[in-house]
Image: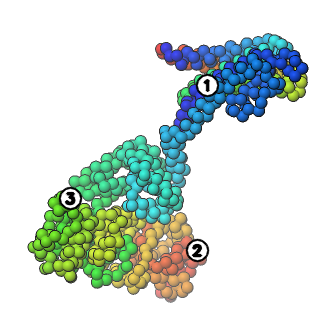
Amino acid sequence: MGNYIFWIILKRLRVPFLVIIITFTIAILGLKLIPGVDNAGHEYHLSFFDAFYFVSYMASTIGFGESPYDFTYPQRIWVSVMIYTTVIGWFYGVGAIVALIQDEALKKEIYRQKFQKHIQRLREPFYIILGYNSITKSIINRLNGCGFRVVVLDKNEEAIDTLILENFYPPVPSFVGDATSQHMLKLAGIHSKYCKGVISLFENDMTNSKIAVITKLLNKKIDIIVKATSQQQIEHFQSLNLQHIKNPFQIISQRIYYGIVAPHIWLLEMWMYGHVLKLRKRDYLPKGRYILCGTGRMGQAIKYGLQKAGVEYVEYDLNAKAYQKKNNTSVFGSQEDIDILLELGVKESSAIIAATKDDLLNLTLLSKAKQLNHDIFTIARENSLDELNIFQAAKVNRIYVIEKILADTTYNYIARPLADLFIHEARKRDDAWAQVIVNLLNNISGMNPKYYEKKINSDGAYALSNRLEKQETITLGDIRRSRENNKELLHIVYLLLKRGDEVFLVPDSSMPLEIDDELLIVADEENYNDFEYIINNYYELEYALEYHKKKLRSSSQ
Amino acid sequence: MNTYKIVSGSFIILAMTVNFGFFYGDPTVLIQHNEYELFAAIVINLITTVLKLGDKTQLGAVLLSTSIVADIQLIASATVWTIAEYMLHDTSVGTTTAIVSLSGGALIANIVSVVLYMGDTLKSKR
C-alpha cells in the first residue's frame, strides 16, 4: 500500500467522523425515546427512520421543518439542545475536511505522487537536470526538440514555479527538492531504465562534486554531465571515472588557442554551434600582443591557452571584488585606471581580454581600451545572458557567454554525439587539413550547410540495412547518387563514420558500409531528404545502386 | 498500556457482541429482534470502522475491510426493514428472514475481525 495520501486523509478524518457519528446517535436516540403527539392527539414515538431523517437535515442546517407531526415541548427542548451539538459537530467535520485539502503536507504529497507517476509513465530516454536557470532552460528547450525528455529538480520553489509557467512541450516533470539528497534523485527516476543521465551545472563546485559522487553510487550506467571550473576539481572527477566534465573556462581557452593557431579548426567547431561556415575578417584573432585582465579561474585558463599558442601577453591582476571595494564602483576609467592601461601597453597591443566576474567592469574596461587604441581587438567574458544586448551594442569584438557555452556544449554532447566527436578528432589535425575540409564543404553544400547524424539500422535506414543484412557489399559512394539521375552525385559529404570504437574522419567513398555504422553527414535540407529516401525506400535504393552495377558490367565486358 | 488500544479493542469486541444480540433469536419472528439493538449495532460498527482508519499495515487494511463489510450488511438490514415497513407495509416471514440474515452476515464479518485482532495480539511479544 504505497498510497500515502489516502492514509493521511483517513487518519486525519478519524476525529471528525467520530464527532459526527456520536452527536447524531445521541440526537437520534433522544428523538426516538421522547414521546410525541400525532394530529389526532394520540401518543406516538418517532421511528428510527423518522428520527434519522429529521436529524440529518437538522444537523446540516437544511431544516425542512418538524415531521411527521408538529413536535411537543419536550421534543422541542431536546431538539434545541441537539441543534447546537449536531450543527457544531457537523461544521467541525466539514471544516476539518476543508483544512485537510488546504494542508501543505498533503498538497506536497499529492504533488510528489503526481511527479512520481509522471516519471514512471515516461517511455522515452530522459535526463535529470538539477537546478533550473537560464542555462538549463535553453538545454531543456533544445532537448525537448530532439526526442529526449527532461526531469528537473530544484531546491528553490520559485524556480519550479517559473518552470511550470514556461509551459514546455512535451511537459517537463519538476519537483522542489534538494538535488544533493539521494532520496530526491531516486524520486526523479535515477533508477529508471530510461534515465540516460544527470546534468549538474551548479555554480558551486562542491555541490557538483557531491552530486557526482551520489549519482555514481546510485547508478553506474548513466552519464553524468558535470561542471568543473578548477584543475583540482577536474582531477577529482576524472578519478571518479566521469565521462563528461564541463569546464567553461577551458572551453574558452581552447577556442582562443585554436582561434590564434588554427582558425579553420576553430571555424569547424563554431560551425557545429551555428556559425556560418566561412571565415570573415572579423573572425580572425590578431597575432600580436595580448593584454589579459583578470587572473581568476578564467584568467588562468586563458593564460594556458595563450602560452600554448606561443603568443606574447601581459597580465593585469584585476579582481572584480577588490576593485569594487577599493573604488566603490564597477565602472572602470579613472585617471589611475587609464595610467595602468597605458603602462600595460594598450597602444602597442593588438588584443585585450576582459575576464573578470563583473560584467560592468569588463564592459567599461574594454570601452576605455578601445578609446585609447582604436584598432585593439576586444574580447569579453560575459557572465549572464541578460546583458548580451549591451555587450553587442558596445561593439565588443568577441563575447564569451559562460551560460551559452555550457548550454551549447551540453546539448551537443547529448543530442549530437558525432558532432562532438568530430570536433575532438579535428583538433588533432592541422589547420591546412581543416582548410581543405572547409573548402570541400563550401563547394558541395554552400556557406551555411547543416549537419545530420544517422545510424544505419532498421529504424533509421530501413532499405539499406535490409540489404546489408543479406551480406551485400554497399559502399558509401554507391548510395551517394542523385535521385533524378543516378549518373550524378548527391550533394552530401560524409564527415565522419563511427563503427564501434573506431572513428573514420572523412571516410573514403569506396568504404563498405556495415550495420550499426553511425554517419555524420553534411548537406542542405533538400539533399539530405533525398539521402533519407534512398536509404529507406527499396526502389530509390535500387535505382541508386543501378549505376554502380552498370559500371561493374561495363568494366567486365 | 495504551488508552487508544483499550478503546478500539473494546469497540471491536462490542461491535461483535451487540451484533450477536440482535441476530440471536428465531429468524422468522421479528418481535425477537430488537430495533434498538440494530441501531446500536450500526452505530458501534461505524465507530469501530472509524477507529480502524489510518492503520497503514496489511493487518490494519484487512481489519478495516471486515468492518466495512459489517457496516454494509447492517445498513442494508436497516434499509430493508425501513422499506418493508413504510413502503411495502409487509412484515411477513420473508422480509423478517432477510433482515435477520443480513445482520448474520455482518456477525460473521465481525467474528473474522475479532479473530484477526486476537491473533495479532497473541503474536506480539509484549
The residue at 55%/27% (across/down) is B55
Number of numbered discs visible in the structure rendering: 3
Q: Chain of mark 3?
A: A
Q: Amino acid at mark 2?
A: Tyr
The residue at 65%/26% (across/down) is A84
Q: Nearer the viewer, mark 2 or mark 3?
A: 3
Q: Earlier in the sequence, mark 2 or mark 3?
A: 3
Q: Amino acid at mark 3?
A: Lys
Which residue is more in the foreground, A398 or B44? B44
Q: Earlier in the sequence, mark 1 or mark 2?
A: 1
Labels 1 and 2 share a subunit:
yes
State whether residue A190 is above or below residue A504. Answer: above
The 10 Å Cα crowd at callout 1, few under 14, some 14 to 19, many 20 or more, is some
Q: Is residue A172 left or right of residue A305?
A: right
State whether residue A458 is above or below residue A117. Answer: below
Spatial separation of the CA atoms under disc 1 and disc 2? 74 Å
The 10 Å Cα crowd at callout 3, few under 14, some 14 to 19, many 20 or more, is some
Spatial separation of the CA atoms under disc 2 and disc 3? 66 Å
Q: Position of residue A103 (x, y in %)?
A: 51, 39
Q: Amino acid at mark 1?
A: Leu
Picture quarter containing residue A466?
bottom right
